[in-house]
Amino acid sequence: MNNPPPETRTDPDDETLPCGRLLSQVWADWEEGVHDEHTAQCAHCRLAVADLERLESQVRALDSDPAQQPVDAASFIDRVMDVVRLELRPGRPLPLGEADEDLRIMENVAARTLRQAAEEVPGVRAGSCRLTLADAPGGTPVNVDLSVHVPLTTPDVQALAQEIRDRVGVTAHERLGLHLGEIDVRITDLVSEDEDEAAPRSAQEGSAP
Amino acid sequence: MSASADTMHSELAHVVREVPGVAFLAPGLRSRLRALRATSPLARPGDDTPGITVSAPSGEGRTSATTVEIRLICRSDRRTLDTTRAVREAVDHHLTTRHPGDEFRIIVTVTGVT
Amino acid sequence: MTGNPPPGEPPDVEGERSDDTLMTERAAEGDEDAFAVLVRRHAPALLRLATRLLGDRAEAEDAVQEAFVGAWRSLPEFQGRSSFGTWMYRIVTNRCLNTLRARRPQAPLNELPDLPAPAYTTAPDRITEGRAALHDVQEALSTLSPEQRICWTLRTLDGRSYAFIAKTVGISEQAVRARVFRARRQLTHSLGAWQ
């Protein structure tokens, strides 16, 4: 055993090169792009680095081997979704129309329709849409708690939220026939438009691209 | 008994499918399995009269009515509530014609909109 | 000499990440179509990851499929503390670690090739031998411990930072560094480059 330099981690697998440097340190310096006088000139260090470089290029060659690359993910995805569809979580049935009509819609189906309604407002993307039965005497309205992402460029966020609420309310009534109670719209993110952040919203809605 | 239950199922399935706005009856578990659908002789279409459950009166709860539950997928071009009401009416009409004097509770559940 | 460190973490497309958040929320509420979007988006990279970690395509598909199904089940409890991609990356990595642990070593350690026969094995142009060299690398990889193999693969092939690997595997960054070092030493030995 040699005298390890003070910064040595006590790894029994480490090795001191004939020049006195630890192999682990030489490789770590290479990896982090650290250079010094010694390593630039020391034959032992250069050899150690050359070996590591050779190893890395060999394994990269392995990695680009076509046999290792996914050929067709489509059938794999189908298989995954087949298993998932055996374990659906449709949620609870919610009342359509009047409570005593025995007409119901599954929570998920209603949520999907209401998300779509919110997304009819330009630039809006919908995420969570929770539907809960309100405790109201005589009726069974459903409360909506909806999360959306809206464009960063939205001039009036409050107005946009109101537009979403209106759209959701109208859709619930006209397309589903679901009595809604409160519609809570939460804006959870402002998303910058990819192409041109400076572009005013009207440009995106305008007829001429 | 079971033969008449089979008949009842297929007649109801026919009645429901005729209602405007109905896309199809909710598929059973078996037909949800793509692999089985493709390869298994067990998975003939219409095999397990999907989407319709008839349960005998339980004795408790609402009188002595037989419960008929219809699970279906609606078309998005028609108001869902209107479709389900039409389904209930069609089923009710069918049952009172075919089984006069019997009492039925009809539940219609929408499991999808397409 | 020029250090050629792998990049830190692969860049995320901003829009896709934002959409992932929404799709994850929907899937957590039982929207399987949203989950299908996530599967479609993340399956190719995760399959590549698992194939790298396991060196076997069929085992990789099993690991990733189990990871996705497990994710679907636990999504309602997923708090969104990390992105869906990071979460899945962690699940797949840990499944692969378990697969490697369960695997009987293909080559017992005592059958390791001895220190290199000189000249031709150490010649730099060995890389151009293509598949034969690849076979050697495969062989050498199978001599690593599962933990070494995971850490080394994430570092060298997947280009992850030590901090990221530490978080993913759930050990200290120093432990990751030690494992990567030992793996490198073992591999250079096995491949006859280092002596």
Image (cartoon, rainbow, N blue to C red):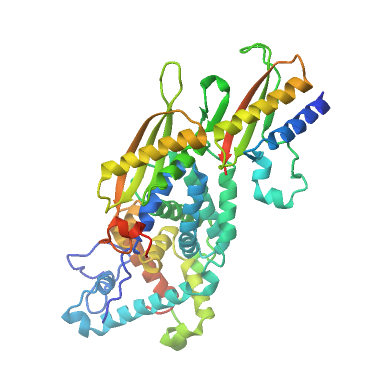
- Horizontal side of A160 relative to B24 (left or right) equals left
Q: Nearer the viewer, residue A151 or C190?
A: A151
- Horizontal side of C69 relative to B91 (left or right) equals left
Q: Which corner quadrant holds the N terminus of chain A?
A: bottom left
Q: Nearer the viewer, residue A63 or A132?
A: A132
The residue at 33%/70% (across/down) is C6
- B106 in relation to C120, above or below: above
Toward which corner of the image does residue B30 lie, by quadrant? top right
The residue at 54%/53% (across/down) is C65
Place of residue C136 in the rendered image (x, y in percent of width and height, measured from the top left): 50, 75
Place of residue A144 in the rendered image (x, y in percent of width and height, measured from the top left): 40, 33
- C7 in relation to B39, above or below: below
- A12 in relation to B32, above or below: below
Check the image and name the residue furthest to the front.
Answer: A207
- Horizontal side of A48 relative to B16 (left or right) equals left
Toward which corner of the image does residue A28 lie, by quadrant? bottom left
